[in-house]
Image (tube, rainbow, N blue to C red):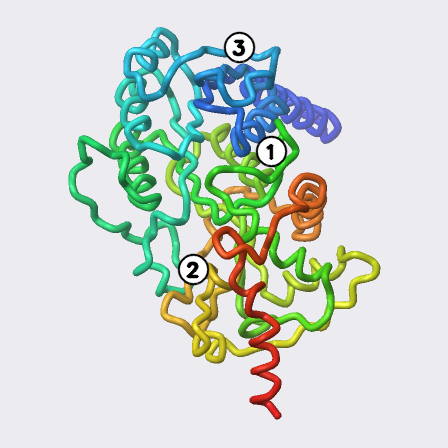
């Protein structure tokens, strides 16, 4: 075979191979449980770009106007009879986005274990539990907290236990054909509404720093500039889920971006209001702790590398990156979040005692105290 002929043959073979992969992806028969609230619609949109044949199963209550061209099956996930009906068909992929009750995951994994080729579940880094957060560089291989047998009444379980039980059901009934995705706090917008609203995500925690940078003046910057923060862009999450399930990747994946505090502040300052003149004043973690401020809760998007649970924002995402996780720039993520915040949530009160941010209420007092102590 001549060189020209061989080159032509190889190019033709590569084209045929690529075409077959695209056709295979386009023929994927995908069932999404939920699909019309925040994470779900982003996954649907990502899947449609791959040519997936998507069916939605939900109660038809949340944003029922979404995706009018898609097939929709109305039913209740907590009703075993409704879920059992889905077993009348075979599915290449099932994507489970609901977080409220692990009983729903138990029902769907049991009912569809022989009808679904790959079960994908959106979990959370909360499954690691506080003891694991004491470890910097935590990976997916970390042992999760041990739980007693699943209770008959799961309504009073906390978020961590809900997610652990749900993951356990996925692994039990789909041991070699599952993927579990563990995001950090999720940034981004809901395609249905354009808003940042979601029952499990607080506006204050995600938007405090962009709001505070825009206010300008002296700003209390916590800890060290090298402390890290982690967050998940909802589009990154959706894109990785569709890509990984297309490849039938098995196992668990930590899905998020990692920034230093300096990188986070630099990104936010680059998109600040034109008239804002922020002046960051670095205040040590020890001073904040002495003044009864806790990280993550009282001071959003920050955990000191000096404290016991230092690993909370130092979890490894190396496995997901190796598997193809693509990350939008922090600038893009924060810009989208900021636009949605001012359009839909500009009346949010960061000083509110119940739903606001403690740092916002005590910042001036602490800055005065810190500057006095330095002098």
Circle 3 sits in a helix, a strand or a loop, which is it?
A: strand
Residue reaching furthest front? 353
- The residues bearing labels 2 and 1 have C-alpha atoms spaced at a distance of 26 Å
Give the foreground label among 3 and 1.
Answer: 1
Residue reaching furthest top? 88
Q: Is residue 322 visible?
A: no
Residue reaching furthest bottom? 375
Say which of 212 and 57 sits in front. 212
Circle 2 sits in a helix, a strand or a loop, which is it?
A: helix
Left or right of 212 on screen, residue 255? left
Label number found at residue 71: 3
**Residue on which disc 2 sits:** 312
Residue at 63% over, 59% down: 209
Sooner in the amino-acid sequence: mark 3 or mark 1: 3
Sooner in the amino-acid sequence: mark 3 or mark 2: 3
Mark 3–mark 2 CB contact (< 8 Å):
no
Give the foreground label among 2 and 1.
Answer: 1
Say which of 133 and 343 sits in front. 343
Left or right of 214 on screen, residue 156? left
């Amino acid at each position: 075979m001549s060189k020209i002929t061989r080159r032509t043959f190889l190019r033709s073979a590569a084209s045929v191979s690529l075409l077959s992969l695209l056709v295979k992806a386009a023929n994927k028969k995908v069932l999404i449980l939920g699909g019309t609230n925040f994470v779900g619609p982003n996954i649907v949109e990502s899947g449609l770009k791959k040519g997936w044949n998507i069916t939605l199963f939900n109660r038809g209550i949340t944003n029922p106007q979404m995706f009018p061209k898609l097939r929709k099956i109305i039913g209740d996930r907590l009703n075993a009879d409704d879920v059992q009906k889905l077993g009348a068909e075979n599915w290449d992929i099932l994507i489970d986005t609901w977080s409220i009750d692990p009983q729903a995951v138990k029902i769907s994994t049991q009912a569809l274990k022989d009808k679904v080729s790959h079960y994908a579940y959106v979990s959370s880094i909360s499954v690691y539990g506080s003891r694991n957060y004491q470890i910097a560089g935590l990976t997916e291989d970390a042992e999760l907290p041990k739980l007693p047998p699943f209770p008959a009444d799961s309504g009073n379980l906390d978020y961590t236990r809900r997610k652990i039980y749900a993951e356990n059901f996925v692994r039990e009934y789909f041991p070699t054909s599952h993927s579990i995705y563990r995001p950090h706090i999720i940034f981004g917008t809901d395609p249905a509404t354009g808003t940042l609203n979601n029952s499990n995500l607080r506006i204050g925690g995600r938007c405090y720093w962009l709001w505070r940078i825009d206010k300008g003046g002296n700003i209390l910057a916590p800890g060290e500039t090298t402390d890290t923060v982690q967050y998940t862009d909802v589009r990154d999450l959706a894109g990785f889920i569709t890509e990984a399930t297309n490849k039938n990747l098995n196992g668990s994946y930590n899905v998020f971006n990692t920034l230093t505090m300096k990188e986070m502040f630099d990104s936010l300052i680059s998109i600040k209001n034109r008239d804002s003149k922020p002046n960051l004043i670095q205040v040590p973690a020890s001073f904040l702790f002495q003044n009864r401020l806790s990280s993550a809760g009282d001071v959003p998007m920050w955990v000191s590398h000096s404290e016991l649970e230092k690993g909370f924002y130092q979890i490894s995402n190396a496995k997901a990156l190796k598997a193809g996780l693509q990350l939008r720039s922090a600038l893009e993520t924060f810009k989208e979040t900021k636009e949605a915040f001012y359009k839909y949530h500009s009346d949010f009160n960061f000083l509110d005692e119940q739903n606001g941010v403690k740092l916002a209420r005590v910042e001036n007092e602490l800055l005065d105290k810190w500057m006095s102590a330095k002098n």
